[in-house]
């Protein structure tokens, strides 16, 4: 699972309820999906720096998810995974984090769930899906643009 879905599910916004239900199914292992624990750190960065969520609120929301100790959490970034991540980043012309998500998807023969439309266009040999219905995602993007003043 990509960091975008994690951050959306951990602060008030129009898509939160839908994504939180999706994340809940992942954490309960009803949906088989891998969440790198380092994605939680990325979500904290996005929530606090760009979305202006209070640090304590972001911390509490994210630690609640981590404390589930769900089997969905992937707790290790190995050297091979890091190498694959960089290879993917170069090959797909994406950020190194996205390269890591692609490496995990290939390793686990899994679908990438993300809100990153560029990743969906660039990666063709692994399924890449935005699980948020189009109308909810559009509403979220309108809300986000208004919140950020763009």
Image: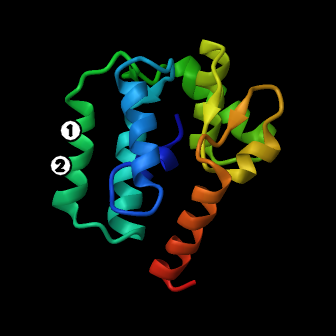
Name which quarter of the figure residue 92 lies in: top right
SS for dot 2: helix
| Image location of residue 141, percent across then percent down | 58, 67
Give the image location of residue 14, x and y in percent: 45, 62
Near-viewer residue (1 or 78): 1
Horizontal side, residue 119 vs residue 110: left or right:
right
Towards the viewer: 6 or 80: 6
Mark 1, secondary structure of its residue: helix
Name the residue: 64% across, 48% down.
95
Q: Quadrant of the C terminus?
A: bottom right
Residue 7 showing in the rendered view: no
Q: How many marks?
A: 2
| Residue 45, numbered circle | none
Q: How far apart are marks 1 and 2 (CA)?
A: 6 Å
Image: 47 above or below 84: below
Labelled pair 1, 2 in contact (Cβ < 8 Å)? yes
Give residue 60's mark.
2
Give how far across and how far down residue 22 sits, in percent: 46, 36
128 vs 103: above or below: below
Q: Which of 114 and 46 is in front in this view?
A: 114
* Residue 36 appears left or right of 142: left
Q: Residue at position x 48%, y 19% from top?
A: 78
Disc number placed over residue 64 in the picture, else none:
1
Residue in view at x 63 percent, y 23 percent: 105
Answer yes or no: is residue 54 visible.
Answer: yes
Residue 48 coordinates in the image, percent (x, y): 32, 64
Is 95 left, or right, of 49 in this rendering?
A: right
- Graded by Cα atoms within 10 Å as few (under 14), some (14 to 19) or many (20 or more), the crowding at tag 1 reads few
- Residue 141 versus residue 148: which sits nearer the camera? 141
User: In the displayed structure, would residue 46 be above or below residue 73?
Assistant: below
């Amino acid at each position: 699972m990509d960091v975008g879905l994690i951050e959306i599910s951990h602060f008030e916004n129009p898509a939160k309820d839908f994504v939180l239900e999706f994340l809940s199914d992942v954490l309960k292992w009803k949906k088989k999906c891998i969440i790198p624990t380092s994605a939680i750190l990325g979500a904290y960065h996005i929530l606090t720096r760009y979305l202006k969520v209070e640090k304590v609120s972001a911390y509490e929301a994210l630690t609640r998810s981590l404390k589930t100790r769900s089997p969905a959490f992937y707790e290790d970034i190995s050297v091979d995974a890091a190498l694959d991540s960089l290879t993917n980043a170069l090959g797909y012309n994406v950020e190194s984090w996205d390269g890591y998500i692609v490496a995990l998807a290939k390793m686990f023969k899994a679908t990438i769930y993300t809100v990153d439309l560029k990743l969906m266009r660039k990666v063709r040999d692994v399924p890449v899906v935005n699980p948020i219905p189009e109308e909810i995602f559009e509403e979220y993007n309108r809300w986000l643009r208004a919140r950020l003043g763009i």
